[in-house]
Image: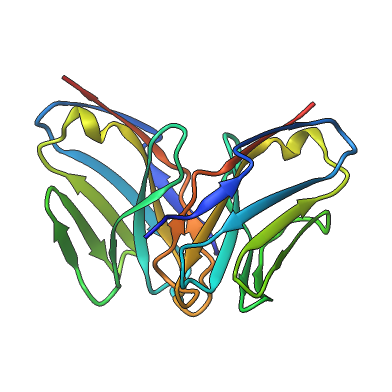
Amino acid sequence: KAGVTQTPRYLIKTRGQQVTLSCSPISGHRSVSWYQQTPGQGLQFLFEYFSETQRNKGNFPGRFSGRQFSNSRSEMNVSTLELGDSALYLCASSSLGGETQYFGPGTRLLVL
Amino acid sequence: QQQVKQSPQSLIVQKGGISIINCAYENTAFDYFPWYQQFPGKGPALLIAIRPDVSEKKEGRFTISFNKSAKQFSLHIMDSQPGDSATYFCAALTSSASKIIFGSGTRLSIRP
C-alpha cells in the first residue's frame, strides 16, 4: 500500500504570495490532518478533514485554510505569506480520523 | 492544559546503553499516548503507543512506562543502536478528537 504523498516537496515563495500544498492519503483513509513543524514552535496541529468536512481546527490565523475532495485528497492554502510561515508542512492520514496517523514526508516551504 | 512537556531536549547515549525520554501532560482527557520517531528529511513515524489503563507496553527494544496518577510517561530504548539516532516526539490526544499534541522533541544520538 502506498504511503501518504505530498506535493511539492520543496517550495520557495516571497512575502505576500499565496501557496497551495497537496496531500494524497493512504488508500482507504478518509481523515487527513495537517501540521506545521518549525524549530521554534515544534509540531503544531493546523486542521483535520474527514469526509470533506473540517472536523478540528488548531490555533492558526484565517490565512491558513484547507479543503478535502471526495477522493479524500486534501489541499492546504496559505494566503498573504509571511516570513514566519517558513516551515515543514506535514500531512497525516488515518482510516477513521483517530489515533493512528501516518505522516507524509512533508512540504518544505521557504518564504523570502 | 493542552501542553505535553518533554525532556531532555537532546541526549547522547553509548551504543548498547539505555535511552530514556520523559514526558508529562496535564489534560486528563487525553486517552492515547503515541511516540513518534523522525529522521532528517522524513515525516514522523509512529513507533509505539499506550493507553492510560496500561502501565507498561513493550515492543522489541522499545518500552513505554506510564504513570497515570503522576500524569507522566516515558520511552525506554534498550540496547540503543546508531540507527536509533533520530528525533523522538511524545504525543497525546483524545481519540475522539484526532488532534495530536506533540512534545517539543528529543534529539537522540547514539555513539558507536
**Picture coordinates of residue B105, whole percent (x, y):** 43, 42
**The N terminus of chain A sits in image quarter:** bottom left
Furthest residue to the top?
B112
Residue at 51% from the left image edge and 71% from the top image edge: B98
- Residue A31, image x and y in percent? 54, 71
Residue A95 is left or right of residue B52, and the answer is right
Q: Nearer the viewer, residue A72 or B85?
A: A72
Quarter occupied by residue B81:
top left
Q: Residue at x 50, y 63 (%)?
A: A93
Q: Residue A16 in the image: state x and y as whole percent.
A: 90, 38
- Residue A42, given in percent of the width and then of the height, sits at 55, 43
- Quarter holding residue A17: top right
Quarter the C terminus of chain A occupies: top right
Is A74 on the left-hand or right-hand side of B90? right
> Relative to residue A63, is residue A82 depicted above or below?
above
Viewer-closest of A5 and A60: A5
Q: Considering depth in this image, is A22 or B7 the residue closer to the camera? A: A22
B95 to A86, vertically: above or below: below
> Is residue B102 found left or right of B71 in the rendered image?
right
Q: Identify the residue at image location x=61%, y=71%.
A: A71
Would residue A89 be found to the left or right of residue B91 on screen?
right
Quadrant of the rendered image containing residue A109: top right
